[in-house]
Image (cartoon, rainbow, N blue to C red):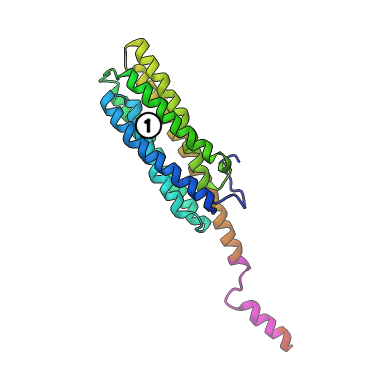
Amino acid sequence: MAGCCHTPGAFDGTSPKFRRLLWTVITINAVMFVVELTAGVAAGSMALQADALDFLGDTATYGLSLFVIGRPLVARSRAALFKGLSIGALGLWVLGATLWRVFILEQPEAFVMGGIGLLAFGANLACALLLIGYRDGDANIRSVWLCSRNDAIGNLAVVVAASGVFATGTAWPDLAVAAVMAVLFLSASVKIVRHALSELAFVKAENGKARDAAPQDGAPIVQATRATLD
């Protein structure tokens, strides 16, 4: 799926197995938010703090995904639209915070960054592997897959940044990775929003067809009655 068009019959998450997987993914993300935020503040790493906020955002949005499973397509699409906009707002915040940190340039703890980055990568890789079979679902389900995939990529970038901080003795690699993660957030936001809008447009078109096909003010019934009488 290209991520920007509606596919009729796409998986909507209504299966006990997927619900269990989603609860597992929510738990992993909630735990990693606490771990990574604590480590990010202690190490002075903007990249780790950005990734921790991503874990928090994922915990909330995955919970929303779980809540709307089984509901009408319009509800699921609106939930996906909200998640897409939220991810975009997070990306803008990380980008702004990164630009602000450029003027501070405190060197983060490279070893803490690298160790926690590897732990976060393992957590997100596990989530992505659990969800890979559902990556072609509707906008609500696809948004979960996209977040997990992008998070795993972001975690690898944090590990690379830690190596750069250790090698250069400066904070620039950390800030560069934080900026890249912000771009990833914004890219995922655009894909999810486009997909959700396409589904909402599909629902609107289908509702329009249903209204056009319905009797208008009883006119067809009246005409049929007159024809019978004649």
Mark 1 is surrounded, within 10 Å at the Cα level, by few (under 14), some (14 to 19) or many (20 or more) other residues, namely many
Residue extending furthest toward the bottom: 229
Residue 96 falls in which quadrant of the image?
top left
Q: Is residue 170 left or right of residue 127?
A: left
- Viewer-nearest residue: 207 or 27: 27
**Left or right: where 206 falls relative to 71:** right
In the rendered image, which quarter contains the C terminus? bottom right
Region of the chain picked out in magenta, as a range: 211-226
- Give the amino acid type for the residue marked by disc 1 in the picture: Asp
Task: Give coordinates of residue 83: x percent, y percent.
Answer: 43, 45
Image position of 182 with respect to 82: above or below: above
Q: Do we see residue 196 in this rendering?
A: no
Q: Identify the residue position indicated by label 1 in the image.
A: 51
Give the x, y percent position of residue 207. Answer: 56, 61
In the figure, residue 87 lies in which quadrant?
A: top left
Q: Name the residue at 55% across, 56% down.
A: 203
Q: Is residue 7 above or below residue 169?
A: below
